[in-house]
Amino acid sequence: MTWFADNSTVIQTLTAIATALIWAVYLQMLLSGVLRQRRPTLSINRGAGEGLQAQIILSNLGYEPIYVQDVLVALDVDGDGTRTSYVTDRRELSDDQTGPGLSGTTQGPMKMGDYISLGTVQGILTRAAPNFDTTRLPGLNEITFIVLGTGQKPGGARKSYRVVRDRGEVRHLQPTRLDTERLSARQCRRIHEDQGSDV
């Protein structure tokens, strides 16, 4: 007991330091969880069809609303490299199909849990490369869909699909990875700088 009494100030100091470290770690975990929840989380998937008629679905899985600002598609074509184009506006739709409001564009706000269709694969390809044979997709190896948005923090998403053919005909698109790649604010700015504005 005399050892504890003699070293009580040292023990109290060490206990205070250990308590402070535990609280610092706890605070760091809490803060990183809150920041992770506030980051935009977008998901890009295909569904409601196969091959060129499949819809490309964008979902907001984050806790915050996000404003979809730009949609781009990158086409990896044999002998031509990768060509990236804006496909934000649904130019393949007629005025009768779009109606009033923002139905002729993929631009607009998305609340938590919202989802929108970016269009069919064939419609998106028609917007990206009007002179491309979208029925057979000659030389097209991979399609990458890119979405750029703004909200509390800028963010975006990217997902790539390999084109799978059978006897020259497109059978389906196979994702190169299971989940959607999240784009940071810096990556979104770099894409904007590389592509210029769609305005």
Image (cartoon, rainbow, N blue to C red):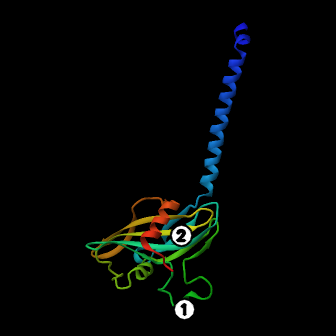
What residue is drawn where x is 54% and y is 81%? 105
Residue 39 % position (x, y): 59, 58
| Residue under numbered circle 2 | 58
The image quadrant that residue 106 belongs to is: bottom right
Can residue 56 be seen here? yes
What residue is drawn where x is 49% and y is 67%? 45
| Residue under numbered circle 1 | 95
Residue 133 % position (x, y): 33, 83
Q: Residues within 10 Å of mark 2 (few under 14, many from 20)?
A: many
What residue is drawn where x is 59% and y is 88%? 99
- 8 above or below 159? above
Q: Specify whether 5 is left or right of 130.
A: right
Q: Amino acid at mark 2?
A: Leu
Viewer-side residue, 135 vs 29: 29
Secondary structure under tag 2 reads strand
The image quadrant that residue 100 belongs to is: bottom right
